[in-house]
Image (spheres, rainbow, N blue to C red):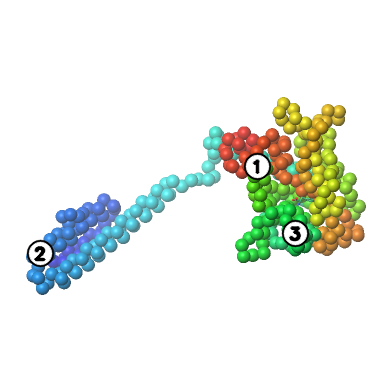
Amino acid sequence: MTNLETLLSDFNSQISAVQNKQQLEEIRVNFLGKKGLVTELFSQLKNVPNEEKKAFGAKINQLRDQVTQKIDIAKDHFENAELNEKLIGEKIDVSAPTRKSSAGKIHPINQVMLEIEEIFGALGFDFAKGPEIEDDFHNFTALNMPADHPARQMQDTFYLKNSDLLLRTHTSNTQIRKMLNSQPPLKVAALGRVFRRDSDQTHTPMFHQFEGFVVDENINMGHLKWTLENFLEKFFEVKNVELRFRPSFFPFTEPSAEVDINYSIENGRIKIGGSKNSLGDRFMEILGCGMIHPNVLENCKIDSKKYQGFAFGIGIERLAMLKYGITDLRMFFENDARFLNHFGF
Ligand code: PHE
């Protein structure tokens, strides 16, 4: 009869000296395999006197469990070590230079934002960033939209669960934040992401806006018009951009206007501007603007008797589509490498 204690201590000394998976497998076969030492014990069961069978059976079961458990632990150990080694070997050096064929490019949205920064930087505008997760006050209330204002429904808002916060629906929150912590004169531009519950061919739930505003003494719509014309001529690199101001409504501006830009179709492509006598005869809406409502100035502790301001908001995707001839809004967000290679910078 095999001595169980000797067998177990044999096993223990072997398993504590095991160096690798192959050795472990040998030990496993030696003890638990079909003809293994532990397995053999079960065939000895028939030689055990009846009254001892139960106790002996329990003992060898226990022994088998102990051995199995230790082998499993050792197996885990070697497999983890193997995995770690593999992970170290597969480490990616993110600072390594790219292969030429897959060099990165600037996304057209970023390119437009860089161009805006250049043009408005040269005009002396400060660049401000407002938060994308915003509260009701900065996105609505301070912009002259109290709680029950119907204009709130014009902007399908994403609200955060179990909180008063929301995803900003426009970059106009930056106006409020900037005016609240500084005094005029102010010339500010803000670029960033905005969010609306809207999704179809011409709307995506996230898009980018560019907001510009000026607050000073004696500011009027003429300053607004010059700023927009000057910007659009520089941006589209053309002379004679013609803008059409259509009366409109925003709670935070009075008067308010929507602005259309003239264009023509040349060889199937949209062409903005042109020489004075060959201007396109079509118009397309590109932005909203107006004189900042006195209530908004007062909400931001700015004396509306002394100061006036203009503000405008433009969709960046729209600008990029017009300038680069991109026809589908959704292409901006599909991360298709072919799109980036073609339209990237
Ligand atoms: N915030 C407006 C919008 O997103 C655009 C706008 C900005 C209009 C500033 C007027 C002045 O629709």
> 65 and 199: which one is in front?
199
> 151 and 23: which one is in front?
151
Quarter-of-image position of residue 183? bottom right
- Disc 2 designates what residue? 46
Q: Nearer the viewer, mark 3 or mark 1?
A: 1
Report the disc number at residue 201: 1
Q: CA distance from mark 3 to mark 1?
A: 27 Å
Q: CA distance from mark 2 to mark 1?
A: 79 Å
Q: Which quadrant, please, contains the N terminus?
A: bottom left
Q: CA distance from mark 3 to mark 2?
A: 86 Å
Q: Earlier in the sequence, mark 3 or mark 1?
A: 3
- Disc 3 designates what residue? 140
- Does dot 2 land on a helix, a strand or a loop? helix
The residue positioned 77% from the left and 41% from the top of the image is 285
Q: Residues within 10 Å of mark 3 (few under 14, many from 20)?
A: many
Task: Tell me which amino acid carries mark 3.
Answer: Phe
* Relative image position of residue 19 (x, y in whole percent): 28, 54
Q: Residues within 10 Å of mark 1 (few under 14, many from 20)?
A: few
Is ligand 1 within 8 Å of the beta carbon of the residue shown at mark 2? no
The residue positioned 87% from the left and 61% from the top of the image is 303
